[in-house]
């Protein structure tokens, strides 16, 4: 038996957890982000201090609790969910600041361990500072808000409960089908309470990540459907990356000739110049992929959850007899759209399909259209837009000037759409766009975690002015840790994405520009605000390069890559510059009645698109 506090036992346990897949073993919890306050400074903070000299569980001081969860998500996604960072926060607002991060992690199905501090278990001093009191019961705290956002939640009221909570948490973190935010709420008095622990609790424990094989009968049904197709299309989602199935997917498409479109999370599953790659699919996809989707009679979804952007709000697949084959480790996704369910690991499932489809091959009917689209992308990358450059030119320069192993990070605004449509992924892990939750402020924090997970890669965080103002504090963490990031701050004086959406919906970009309030009209449509994001980044410790032209931007990329310190490149763009059309749609309801003519016209357009929407896309004849 070993006598330790609950917090000390927690830290020692986490330091001895490992994951294993395909014979590769690694630390499951490689480190802990944290911000200390009352509730954890004398508990988890003291425990981390004791092991700091040994490096058992490295500690990283974050600057924003939401940001440290984002960093943990970036880290885990880069490691294909085989590792998960821990995050500790103080009682009250410190802990609830992690709620948005928890929502992002679970929506994206990326594992992260949250350790929010909690109220006194003994209630000896209740109500304590920052405690929520409710007349419905004294066992409720603000941390109960984590319950619906977590794939596993427990509160350790007594030391004896810690072992079962920890084992349950590790099980959820390593579940390839259903993972996300895992929360263990820790009352502040219990953290400091001593207990005699069995030594077995601290023994090395390896959590084996399974690769479930497809069931034979399900495989036979899936193969029969695919063989019946005249115009098949494969949609590659994030599950292809997480199961490390990119080579298996390449073998599949080489053998069958079936074209591959990708989602935001699946970008890079096949590289952009593969002859069967047709680009992004859905609301922000390529016209080539969307044209194939409209006519596809069989859609093979691999590791995708079929979000509304992927299905163009259920208007993408218009063949009257379209059928779906869904290869997914999660039955929730395998069952979508009445699909033929193939519940299995993506790599194992693709290999099984390739073998079972031996001799089956479809004809390439899209090569000419793909070549035309590539010329359109080239034009978007080299618009020579004046007087300010277009955002597509910024993305093009970055795409062309970075190396294949460099990572581009984005999450929200207009850039995710432009990136999915235009970015040419040259490496499976080059493209990192968080688009399940599309959280403004993820970019810099996520980039920090990505760089920690892949220190041999250059990481470029693309952040618009709106997202930058939401959260830029982790620049300080990167500087303090000596972690070099490349930041591209795109200044367009407002919310470009929502501005364009607002205009398309007849709302005339209302409330989407950063302007002074006009004293005459009373509207926020005066002169531009004198916001200097470059100066802000510099004040946080970053080296800053200001550029005004695309040629200067290209030179700045090279300078930033060559630097050994966090560098921010600041460039202003024209939010009204043209962007190629995806020839697709996204369902955002328009006011059914309105006094504005612009809204009335937008409603007519909306109803025309709505007519193509299918409540259940797909059929199952088996």
Image (tube, rainbow, N blue to C red):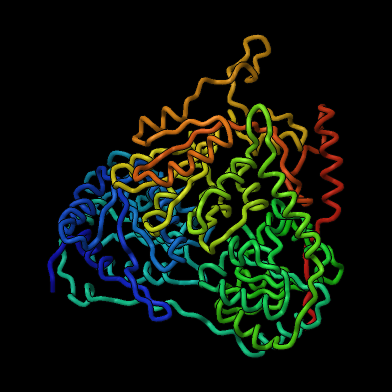
Question: Height in image: 548 above or below 366?
Answer: above
The residue at 22%/47% (across/down) is 41
State the image coordinates of residue 359 (x, y, percent, origin top left): 73, 88
Which of 572 and 350 lies nearest the eye of the viewer?
572
Task: Give the vertical position of 496 relative to 211 (above or below).
Answer: above
Quarter of the image for the N terminus: give it.
Answer: bottom left
Could you say which is closer to the camera, residue 46 or residue 309? 309
Residue 603 in the image: state x and y as whole percent.
83, 39
Task: Identify which residue is drawn at 60% across, 73% down.
Answer: 328
Q: Position of residue 465 (x, y in %)?
A: 53, 34
Query: Residue 363 vs residue 209: left or right?
Result: right
Whether residue 463 is visible, yes or no, is: yes
Left or right: 306 in relation to 77: right
Counting every numbered tag in the picture gives 0
Q: Nearer the viewer, residue 85 or 233?
A: 233
Q: Which residue appears at 51% of the width and 68% of the height?
A: 242
* Residue 118 in sight here: no
The image quadrant that residue 72 belongs to is: bottom left
Residue 74 location, quadrant: bottom left
Residue 134's spot in the image, x, y percent? Answer: 40, 44
């Amino acid at each position: 038996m070993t006598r330790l506090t609950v917090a000390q036992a927690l830290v020692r346990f986490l330091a001895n957890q490992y994951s294993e897949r395909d014979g590769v073993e690694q630390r499951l919890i490689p480190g802990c982000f944290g911000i200390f306050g009352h509730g954890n400074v004398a508990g988890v903070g003291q425990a981390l201090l004791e092991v700091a000299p040994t490096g058992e569980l490295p500690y990283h001081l974050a600057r924003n609790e939401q940001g440290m969860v984002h960093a943990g998500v970036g880290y885990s996604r880069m490691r294909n969910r085989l590792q998960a960072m821990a995050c500790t926060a103080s009682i009250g607002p410190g802990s609830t600041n992690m709620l948005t991060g928890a929502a992002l992690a679970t929506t994206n199905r990326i594992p992260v361990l949250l350790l929010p501090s909690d109220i006194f278990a003994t209630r000896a001093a209740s109500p304590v500072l920052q405690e929520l009191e409710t007349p419905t019961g004294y066992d409720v705290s603000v941390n109960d808000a984590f319950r619906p956002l977590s794939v596993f939640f427990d509160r350790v009221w007594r030391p004896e409960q810690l072992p079962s909570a920890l084992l349950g948490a590790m099980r959820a973190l390593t579940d390839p089908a259903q993972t996300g935010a895992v929360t263990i709420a820790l009352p502040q008095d219990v953290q400091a309470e001593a207990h005699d622990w069995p030594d077995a609790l601290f023994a090395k424990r390896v959590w084996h990540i399974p690769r479930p094989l497809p069931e034979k009968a399900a495989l036979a049904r899936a193969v029969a459907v695919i063989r019946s197709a005249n115009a098949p299309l494969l949609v590659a989602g994030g599950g292809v990356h997480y199961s490390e199935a990119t080579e298996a997917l390449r073998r599949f498409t080489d053998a069958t000739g079936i074209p591959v479109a990708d989602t935001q999370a699946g970008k890079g599953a096949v590289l952009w110049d593969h002859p069967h790659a047709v680009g992004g699919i859905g609301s922000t996809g390529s016209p080539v992929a969307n044209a194939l989707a409209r006519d596809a009679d069989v859609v093979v979804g691999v590791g995708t959850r079929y979000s509304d952007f992927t299905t163009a709000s259920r208007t993408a697949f218009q063949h009257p007899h379209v059928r779906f084959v869904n290869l997914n480790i999660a039955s929730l996704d395998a069952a979508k759209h009445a699909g033929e369910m193939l519940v299995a690991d993506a790599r194992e499932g693709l290999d099984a399909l390739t073998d079972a489809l031996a001799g089956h091959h479809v004809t390439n009917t899209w090569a000419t259209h793909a070549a035309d689209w590539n010329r359109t992308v080239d034009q978007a990358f080299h618009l020579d837009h004046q007087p300010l450059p277009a955002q597509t030119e910024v993305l093009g320069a970055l795409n062309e000037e970075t190396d294949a192993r460099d990572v581009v990070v984005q999450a929200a605004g207009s850039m995710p759409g432009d990136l999915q449509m235009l970015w040419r992924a040259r490496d499976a892990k080059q493209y990192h766009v968080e688009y399940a939750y599309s959280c403004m402020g993820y970019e810099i924090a996520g980039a920090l975690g990505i760089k920690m997970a892949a220190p041999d890669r250059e990481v470029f965080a693309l952040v618009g002015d709106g997202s930058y103002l939401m959260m830029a504090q982790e620049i300080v963490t990167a500087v303090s840790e000596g972690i070099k990031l490349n930041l591209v701050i795109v200044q367009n004086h407002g919310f470009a994405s929502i501005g364009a959406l607002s205009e398309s919906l007849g709302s005339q970009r209302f409330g989407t520009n950063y302007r002074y309030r006009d004293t005459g009209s009373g509207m926020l449509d005066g002169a531009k605000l004198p916001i200097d994001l470059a100066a802000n980044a510099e004040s946080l410790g970053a080296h800053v390069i200001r550029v005004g032209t695309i040629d200067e931007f290209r030179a700045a990329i090279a300078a930033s890559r060559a630097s050994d310190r966090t560098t921010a490149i600041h460039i202003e763009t024209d939010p009204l510059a043209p962007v190629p059309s995806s020839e697709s749609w996204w369902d955002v309801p328009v006011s059914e009645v309105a006094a504005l003519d612009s809204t009335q016209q937008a409603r007519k357009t909306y109803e025309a698109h709505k007519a193509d929407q299918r409540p259940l896309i797909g059929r199952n004849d088996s």
